[in-house]
Structures are given as C-alpha cells and as structure tokens.
Amino acid sequence: MLSAKDALKKLEEGNKRYLSEHTGSGDISPSIRLRTSREGQKPYAIVISCSDSRVIPEGIFSAGIGELFVIRLAGNVIDDHQLGSIEYAEEHLGSNLVVVLGHTGCGAVEAAIHHDPSGFIKYITDEIRLAIGDETDPYRACCLNVEHCVKQISHALDIDHLRHGNDPAVVGAIYHIDDGHVEFLHS
C-alpha cells in the first residue's frame, strides 16, 4: 500500500513517461491478469475522470491492470454512486489517493457554459453550473468543476487535501488533451 504522497509521485512519473511514448506502457501481461485474478486488485490510486474517449487514465499515467481504480462519468461530477465507489476503494482496497481528473475541451463543461440541455444530460450540466457559477472561460470553468468535486469528496468522506500531508488524500488535476500533460491543482 502506497501513501498518498507516494501514489501522487507515481502518477506524476507515469504521466512523464506517457508524454514521450507512442504505445501504452502499463503492465497488461497474462501474468498480471492471472495474478490479479487470484490475489485481487490493489490499486494505488482512485481516479475520477470524465467519460470522454480522449481521456484514458491508465494510459495517461502509464498504469497497468490493477494499479488504478477508475470511476468515469461525463463531466467527472460526483454523486452518491461515485462516493460509494470511492469509499469502497479506500476502505476495502487500501487506496490512499483520490484524484479528480478534469480535462481541457470538456464537452460537459462547454454544455454547462453555452447550452441548456434537456433530458438526463441536464443532471450533469446543472451540477457543473453549481460548481462554475458565472464563469465563461472553459479552462477556468474546468478547474472550478474539479475543485468543487474535490471539496465534495473531502467533505462527504472526511478525506484531507494532500497539502495536509495526511493519508488518505484527495487532489484535483487537469489533463491537457492537446499535449498530454497532467497539471495537478493545488488549492
């Protein structure tokens, strides 16, 4: 089990590898599939990300099978289902780091800024609007949405922000889809 700080360092190092690679580098071998099948999963981090097909957390962090517990939902919004998944991974799998990973060019954030969708999409955009207020800059709105999710998780599950140095921890990040780098937000 890694501490939250060590898990964050591992994610940062994995993203550095990802920036220069042309194919994935995480372990997806038959032996790791067999080992995790027999011994179970022990992810070192929980990543909440958008469902956007350009955002692939395992690839972005050069992680393989069993290394990340990934929760994906358009706009990376948080509700009781996501909180339950986070709680499970923290309490039962030993993951000490929660990363809320927003991204540039997020369609859900853009929809919250510029449109008034109907149907079930409205649940997502309403939550994002709550997070971003009157912000119209897409990058800043993305950051505000991530920060809002970090606060929700921290409050609901009583998890400290990484800056406190306690385990477990929750941190926000933005994935830049144009160049692949992850910017960790420090609030």
Image (spheres, rainbow, N blue to C red):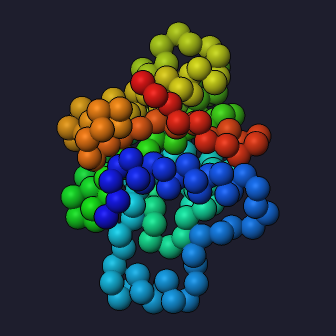
Is residue 103 visible to us here? yes
Give coordinates of residue 129: x percent, y percent: 48, 21
Quarter of the rendering containing residue 85: bottom left
Query: Considering only vertical position in the picture, is 36 above or below 41?
Result: below
In which quadrant will I find the N terminus? bottom left
In which quadrant will I find the C terminus? top left
Give coordinates of residue 140: x percent, y percent: 59, 20
Quarter of the rendering containing residue 34: bottom left
Q: Is residue 120 left or right of residue 174?
A: left
Residue in the picture at 58% in, 53% down = 13
Give coordinates of residue 87: x percent, y percent: 25, 52
Residue in the picture at 66% in, 34% down = 104
Give coordinates of residue 17: x percent, y percent: 67, 57
Total numbered circles: 0
Q: Is residue 91 left or right of residue 39?
A: left
Q: Is residue 79 left or right of residue 180?
A: left
Quarter of the rendering containing residue 69: bottom left
Residue in the picture at 35% in, 32% down = 163
Residue in the picture at 40% in, 33% down = 149
Is residue 72 visible to us here? no
Pick the front one: 36 or 5: 5
Query: Considering only vertical position in the picture, is 172 above or below 95?
Result: above
Pick the front one: 163 or 40: 163
